[in-house]
Amino acid sequence: MAQKDCPQCDGTGWKPVEVDGIRRMTPCDCQNVERSALLLKQAYIPPRYEHCALENFAVRKIPGTDQENPSLARAKFTARKFVEEYPTDFGLLFVGPTGVGKTHLAVAILRELILHRGVEGLFYDFHDLLKAIRDSYNPGTQNTEIGVLQPVLDAEVLLLDELAGSNPSDWVKETLHHIINLRYNYKKVTIITTTLLAKGGTGRPGVRPPSGQDLPDLDYTLNQLGVTLRSRLYEMCKFVEMSSDDFRMAVKQAGNKFRDG
Ligand SMILES: [Zn+2]
């Protein structure tokens, strides 16, 4: 659909161009603008994150120095590279403590792909997704389980935000497994953010018990979702570690690489 008041095409959706001295009609850019706006709307990015872009992701400095936090600088670089190289045959999994900007970068990628590549993307908070599926079981609602799941399975790029849950139920594990597995089989790109859990102690993400012994641990976090799912995530996503200051953890992964390494 063209824009009604477009000065280039007067709302017809077609504008004249001259090629080798011959006047032709070509689709007007305003058609893309409208498509982008529609795709953006259909992605359901929460208002809280709709401003998120790569340009406005500020890499924090290491306190007391003029140096950028290297893990955040790397994460931003990876996000940009991902957008440049899309379509890729892998997704990204942003992992780190609360407040480092995982969702910001993930949304920035999604918006870039929607606005500049015409990708059909979808944002879903993991918790909200589970709730929507659960609610669909209520006899009184209009929504069916497949009605909730289909867009999640179909989206060209899915952003699953805050994948987590300490001690998830079997139902949660199965549901997630179903979603991830289908997307994997259909070679669809999934971008995930997850907050790390510390072993033992508090169970709160990224919080160490007073003993100071238990570091947040990726395998521990992912194992909560099941060992099979963990290995699947390793296969289908490149892991992007984002650390705040003085935050240490071990992320072991080779695997998914960009074309030039
Ligand atoms: Zn136009």
Image (cartoon, rainbow, N blue to C red):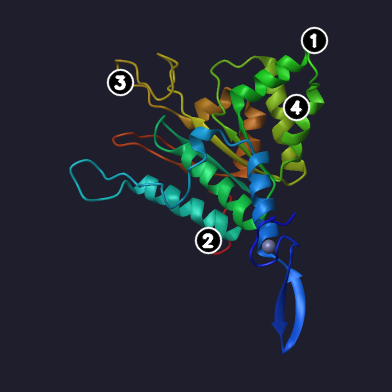
Q: Amino acid at mark 2?
A: Gly
Mark 1 surroundings within 10 Å by alpha-carbon count, few (fewer than 14), some (14 through 19), many (20 or more): few
Comes first in the chain, label 1 or label 2: 1
**Residue wearing tag 1:** 140
Position in image of residue 223 (x %, y %): 57, 26
Q: Amino acid at mark 1?
A: Gly
Is residue 212 shown above or below 44? above
Number of the front mark, 1 or 3: 1
Comes first in the chain, label 3 or label 2: 3
Instruction: Tell me if residue 238 can be seen.
Output: yes
Find numbered disc 2 in the image and state the secondary structure of the residue it sits on. loop
Q: Residue at x 57, y 15 (%)?
A: 167
Q: CA separation, marks 1 and 3?
A: 49 Å
**Residue wearing tag 3:** 212
Of all residues shown, which one is farthest toward the bottom?
A: 21
Instruction: Tell me if residue 88 can be seen.
Output: no
Comes first in the chain, label 1 or label 3: 1
**Residue wearing tag 4:** 148
* Front in this rendered view, residue 128 or 15: 15
Q: Residue at x 41, y 48 (%)?
A: 56
Q: Which quadrant of the render holds ligand 1?
A: bottom right
Is residue 88 shown above or below 98? below
